[in-house]
Image (cartoon, grey):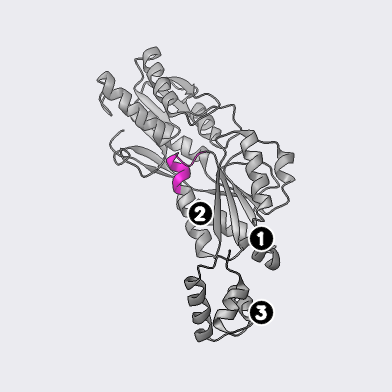
Amino acid sequence: MAVTIKDIAEKVGVSVTTISRVLNNRGYLSDDLKKKVHEAMEEMNYQPNELARSLSRKKSNVIGLIIPDISHPFFGQITKHIEYYAYKHGYKLMLCNSLLNKKKEKEYIDLLRASQVDGIIMGSHTMSVKEYTSIKLPLVTLDRQISKTIPCISSDNYSGGVLATKLLLGKKCRKIAYLSGNLRLNLLAKQRHDAFIEQVSGRDVGFVVKQTDLNGFKYKEYENLVRALFEEHPDIDGVFASSDILALQVIKECRRLGKAVPEHVKVVGYDGIQIGGTDDLSTVEQPVKKMGELAVKYLLRQIAGEDIPLETILPVKLLEKGTT
């Protein structure tokens, strides 16, 4: 049978009300009493009913995070920072992977609402604007602009695209490829593509664009995409990949084909993720830590009833390394 606060009260020799005050940190209580209560809870393996406590407080101190895929290094690293800053402010995190599946994303939103979370950070976007605005919870989007009325935090995707493309142009590349996720998806990352097109248009340079299917996280498809690129355009001498994962696949394919990087093909990635193989990769670094920090900060301000900016765009940084 589950241990109750009544059992704890009897063991310590105080009232149930006193135990409740210790659990909720309300009113003056001596350190000695708090210690006795917590020791009794540990000894009796007492597990507080968090849902019941959140209902009584009208606050759960839990926030939800919905991202496309935790296995993608960018989302894995930003989740790490969000969890850190949430915990630092006394909040726990409920993590959900949408896998870009509309049905799954909606089910997770329903779960988070039923779990009485205080707010949601959205890093996925598969539903309609109306469905998001009907959530009726504090909401911040991350690298996704769902609506002009929903606060959004992102890095400067357009400037990043300009920096990467100008780097390859400055290295005298004659035929440049842009590789990305599917451009039909309504993502701010499309601005990297827009910047690329504007920079190469009207210049005496060839260019080609290749994109994944609608599910941008099938890593086997990255291999097929890059292989097809070099089969169809063997004269490519510069590649701007819209993620570091894609850029690493380009480098792998160049090795297979005997093309030296950067002598034969220059490669620029995007994100600035920290995984094996990226140490020497030229890339556009997103301020991932700052994005995670602001996502938590703005959500908690929203929960407190404060106004927050509807759009926050953070600067990116070009890191030129060995692949260019």
- Residue type pointed to by label 3: Thr
Q: Is residue 70 magenta?
A: yes
Provide the secondary structure element on which disc 1 rests: helix
Instruction: Check disc 2 and report the residue beneath it.
Output: 82
Q: Measured from the top left, where is residue 158 in percent x and y? A: 52, 38
Provide the secondary structure element on which disc 3 rests: helix
Q: How far apart are marks 2 and 3 (CA)?
A: 35 Å
Provide the secondary structure element on which disc 2 rests: helix
Q: Measured from the top left, where is residue 126 in percent x and y? A: 63, 35
Q: Measured from the top left, where is residue 230 in percent x and y? A: 37, 17
Q: Earlier in the sequence, mark 2 or mark 3?
A: 3
Q: Distance between the residues labelled 1 and 3?
A: 28 Å
Q: Which label lies toward us, 2 or 3?
A: 3
Quadrant that contains the C terminus: top left
Within 10 angstroms of label 1, few (less than 14), some, or many (20 or more) residues?
some
Position of residue 195 relative to residue 136, above or below, is above
Q: Going by the image, does 261 lie left or right of 127?
A: left
- Residue type pointed to by label 1: Ile
For the record, the magenta segment spans 69-77
Q: Which of marks 1 and 3 is nearer the N terminus?
A: 3
- Check residue 17 in the rendering and tell me which mark sits there, or answer none: 3
Q: Does the magenta stretch include residue 228?
A: no
| Residue 173 picture quarter | top left
* Residue at point 31%, 27% (across, down): 252
Residue 207 visible to the viewer: yes
Instruction: Check disc 1 and report the residue beneath it.
Output: 303
Given residues 49 and 27, the one toward you in this image is 49
